[in-house]
Amino acid sequence: MEVSNLAWARAADDPCWRLFAATLSGEILELSITQLQPIASTDSSGGAVWALRAAPAVPHTSGSSGSGLQQQLYTAQLAAACADGSVKLFGVSSGEAGAVLQRSLPRVEGNALSLAWHPNGRNLVSGGSDGCMHVWDLRTGGWVRGCCGGGSGSGGCQGRGLSVCL
């Protein structure tokens, strides 16, 4: 098992954080924390996974025994940058081992190699072997903007304007 990335995730009602691994064989694995062995496997549906990132943690308020409401952080979505040029979004559910493929963002040229979530959790940036970066709007699944070749200004960038504050 060639592990390319690791990420922590936690569904809203999970008592503990869970560890996930991306592999170059194209799997998303949930690992046992105590044994570091796979307990569930999901095919990426995009080949080798070069990057795996958890969505930003958000607060969740739940009831706790005897003390009223309790606020905990959780992140229930993982993004995977895949060899086929796509970014796949996976959900993590409470009480269910592994991750479930929720959607695939459109493929781009080359391999998707890197990912960064915006802290708002609604935007994701992917970088690839074609020298381009793509900003995605996860509410629509659409492409917002792309820049290729490290160009700044209009020379290397295309798409709708992206404000500094998303």
Image (cartoon, rainbow, N blue to C red):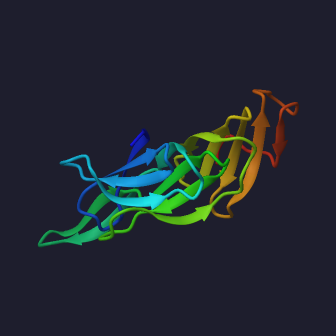
Residues 6 and 77: in front is 6
Q: Within the image, what quadrant is residue 129 found in?
A: top right
Q: Quadrant of the N terminus?
A: top left
Residue furthest to the right? 155
Report if residue 130 is visible in the image: yes
Residues 134 and 57: in front is 134
Q: Is residue 36 above or below residue 63?
A: above
Q: Position of residue 57 (x, y in %)?
A: 41, 52
| Residue at x 11%, y 72% (from the top left corner) | 66
Q: Within the image, what quadrant is residue 14 found in?
A: bottom left
| Residue at x 88%, y 30% (from the top left corner) | 155
Q: Position of residue 117 (x, y in %)?
A: 55, 46
Report if residue 55 is visible in the image: no
Q: Is residue 138 left or right of residue 3?
A: right
Q: Is residue 11 above or below residue 9?
A: below
Q: Position of residue 47 (x, y in %)?
A: 58, 50
Q: Is residue 130 above or below residue 9?
A: above
Residues 3 and 71: in front is 3
Q: Is residue 6 left or right of residue 38?
A: right
| Residue at x 45%, y 46% (from the top left corner) | 22
| Residue at x 66%, y 49% (from the top left corner) | 84
Q: Position of residue 27 (x, y in %)?
A: 46, 53
Number of numbered tags placed on the structure image: 0
